[in-house]
Amino acid sequence: MDAGHARYGVFLDPRAPSDGRTVLDVSDADVPAAEVAKALIALYRAEPGLDQVMLTVGTRPIGACTRTWFARLSGEPLHRLGEGDRAGQPGVSTQFELLRFACTGCDRRAVRLTYDDRDLPSCPEHGVMELRG
Ligand SMILES: [Zn+2]
């Protein structure tokens, strides 16, 4: 077990397929697990159609975090829109800042917590992704 698995392994759904098109790329295993959890909550809240995120550490995939797995784990009400009342829910702010990147050649996407223009996420087929805000 490496540092990434040791720190973030709890987020990973062992039954999830490992071919997700959306990646949450944590720069290295020094990022606190709580920060990664906040990012996952913000991402799932912001994108109701998203069911699975591949977690990578320094671009190396370590596994997949599914919405259902993470909702159970975190106790956060991460239902799809329309399944519950979103107003007045306690918990983490939805204003957590995410940096979203997208490939210009396909539908692969990457999310990062920090910006480093010397090390941008890239698509395995099409190269460096564009920052989408
Ligand atoms: Zn691509």
Image (spheres, rainbow, N blue to C red):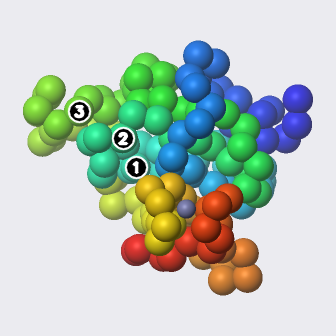
Q: Is residue 12 above or below residue 37?
A: above
Tell me the CA gap for discs 1 and 3. 12 Å
Quick one: label 1, few (<14), some, or many (20+) residues within 10 Å? many
Quadrant in the rendering for residue 88: top left
Quick check: which quadrant has ligand 1? bottom right
Could one spot residue 19 in this view of the protein? yes
Q: Earlier in the sequence, mark 1 or mark 2?
A: 1
**Could you give the CA–CA distance between mark 1 and mark 2, rounded to whole angstroms?**
8 Å
SS at mark 2 in the image: loop
Task: Tell me the residue that label 2 is attached to.
Answer: 50
Near mark 2 (Cα within 10 A), the count class, few <14, some 14-19 or many ≥20, is some
Q: Secondary structure at mark 3?
A: loop
Relative image position of residue 25 (x, y in whole percent):
63, 55
Question: Given the image, on which type of amino acid does mark 3 rest?
Answer: Arg
Name the residue rendered at 41%, 59% in the picture. Answer: 96
Q: Quadrant of the C terminus?
A: bottom left
**Quadrant in which the N terminus is drawn:** top right
Residue 2 location in percent, x, y? Answer: 88, 37
Q: How many marks?
A: 3
State which tag comes first along the sequence, 1 or 3.
Answer: 1
Three-letter code for the amino acid on which mark 1 is drawn: Leu
97 sits to left or right of 26? left
Which residue in the protein does label 3 denote?
Answer: 80
Q: Residue at x 49, y 67 (%)?
A: 105
Crowding at dot 3, Cα within 10 Å, few <14 / some 14-19 / many 20+, comes out as: some
Q: Which residue is mark 1?
A: 43
Q: Are marks 2 and 3 in contact (CB under 8 Å)?
A: no
Disc 1 secondary structure class: helix
Callout in the foreground (1, 2): 2
Q: Is mark 3 within 8 Å of ligand 1?
A: no
Q: Are marks 1 and 3 in contact (CB under 8 Å)?
A: no
Q: Foreground residue, 110 or 115?
A: 110
